Amino acid sequence: MPDPSAPAADLMPVKSPVLVNRVGDEIPSRVILVSYPKIVFLYPIFLASIVAACCHAFFPATLDPAYGPAAVVSTIFLILLAGNMMILAFDFPRTTSLTLFFFVVALVLGFVLLFTFRPGLLPAITRALAAFRPLANSHFYWAFAGILGTILLAVLVAVRFDYWEVRPNELLHHHGFLSNLERLAAPNLRIDKEINCIFEYLLLRSGRLILQASNERRAIVLDNVPFITKKEDDITRMLGALQVQVRTDGP
């Protein structure tokens, strides 16, 4: 029979070992890392093509090629396409490059508006702008969306056969249609994060993640990892966790 005068701590049952990190937060048991090709950043123009196709489907009379709004929709689509392709072609690593990009866009739009509201300023440029009327029907936009959507779907399927899995004590590489597995010890895994393009980070919160295992000479470079900040935080908390065993001494 227990002694009523004994301290309360001596009467508590022994607790099993638990896994916690340094600040006591919940930690993930694993982190999945997927490197995507750059074509995934074309999803804005994919959505724009669907919107343009729906506009033609719901407003066929207004967007007839004989009217001006059809050319406006096509022009907006081309502007979005050009901007999306620039993200694929160039990196904008700093805020200064982002400011320069928006300055060039504002400058071009300013000239277009100037020649639109002041046609007599430069008649030759005004006539060239007036003659520019790109036209496309709903079949074009549906076809564009179908082709790009099929490619994006194929990419989503392909990456399921090539990804990395970070665990507390090991780094796993799943690859191949037969689920080939490569194991790397990762007790002292070094992680470096790089944000090479501001636009890519804004579109998918993506960036480059560099993993360096202690017993491996080569570094593992994963480009275009979505939600890279959260992934890095999860890996850091998981690898920095401590195994604490809470116990009390018996009588």
Image (spheres, rainbow, N blue to C red):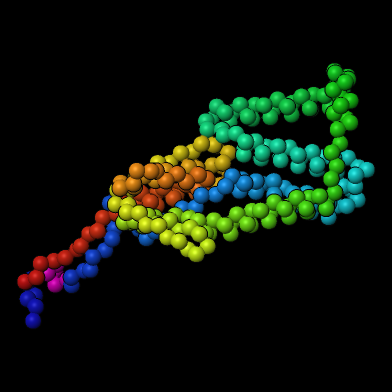
Please name the residue shown 14% across and 72% down the image: 11
Q: Is residue 47 left or right of residue 177?
A: right
Image coords of residue 41 (percent x, y): 61, 45
Quarter of the image containing the N terminus?
Answer: bottom left
Most prominent secondary structure in the magenta stretch? Answer: helix
Which residues, given as a range, are shown in magenta?
A: 8-12
Residue found at the very far right of the displayed protein: 66
Residue found at the very far top of the displayed protein: 121
Q: Is 45 situated above or below 169?
A: above
Q: Quadrant of residue 6?
A: bottom left
Query: What number of labels is visible?
Result: 0
Q: Quadrant of residue 245?
A: bottom left
Q: Nearer the viewer, residue 192 or 55?
A: 192
Image coords of residue 176 (percent x, y): 50, 59
Image coords of residue 164 (percent x, y): 44, 54
Q: Nearer the viewer, residue 198 or 152?
A: 152
Q: Is residue 33 left or right of residue 142?
A: left
**Residue 28 in view:** no
Quarter of the image containing the C terminus?
Answer: bottom left
